[in-house]
Image (cartoon, rainbow, N blue to C red):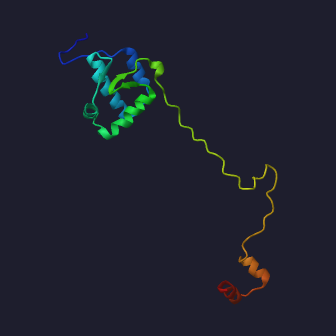
Amino acid sequence: MRTRSSKGWGQLPRALARALAGAKINGSESRVLWAMVYKTIAFNKSSDGIPWSQLAELTGIDQWHLGRSINSLLKKGVIFSKDNVFGIQTDFSKWETPPKQVVIQEPPPDQGELPPKRGELPPKRVDSRDLSKRAYQEKGLSPSEKKKKRKA
């Protein structure tokens, strides 16, 4: 049996409840949205002039950070605003679900040499380590001569 208590009662349309259940919104956006639902639909209004101080009090979000959540909800089309009069967008086709972020990496700038194709050997390169052990041995330098050469 359904009863309406004297403590207040508001009807939430089923379509709106279903749309809210599938909406992709984060935690702070959700708190702001439910505060707006409370201030509008719970009092049988389609929109209401809601001061940010009331939203901050209802949500527990600092007024400085409310703008981020409100702007995000406006961008997604979940709410509408006109001169600080907020309401829930009931035309759900206007709701936008943000696309998944895709990071496209640009190839590095041309460095002059392309990687070898499959099956081909890379170009022959000369070892740039002149002071390697093998280089000293080939030149016939003794350990003391190595030290002198390093100091010079």
Number of numbered labels in the structure image: 0
Which residue extends farthest top?
Answer: 1
Q: Is residue 24 visible?
A: no
User: Where does residue 44 sit, x and y in percent of width and height?
Assistant: 28, 15
| Image side of residue 91 versus residue 106, left or right | left
User: Where does residue 128 sit, x and y in percent of width and height?
Assistant: 73, 70
Relative height, residue 59 to residue 8 (above, below): below
Which residue extends farthest front?
Answer: 83
| Image side of residue 145 versus residue 90, left or right | right
User: Where does residue 106 sit, x and y in percent of width and height?
Assistant: 64, 45
User: Where does residue 23 sit, x and y in percent of width and height?
Assistant: 43, 26
Residue drawn where x is 37% and y is 22% of the image: 88
Q: Is residue 58 visible?
A: yes
Q: Quadrant of the C terminus?
A: bottom right
Q: Quadrant of the N terminus?
A: top left
Residue drawn where x is 37% and y is 32% of the image: 70
Residue drawn where x is 66% and y is 84% of the image: 150
Which residue extends farthest left?
Answer: 6
Relative height, residue 79 to residue 134 (above, below): above
Displayed quadrant of residue 105 = top right
Residue drawn where x is 22% and y is 13% of the image: 4
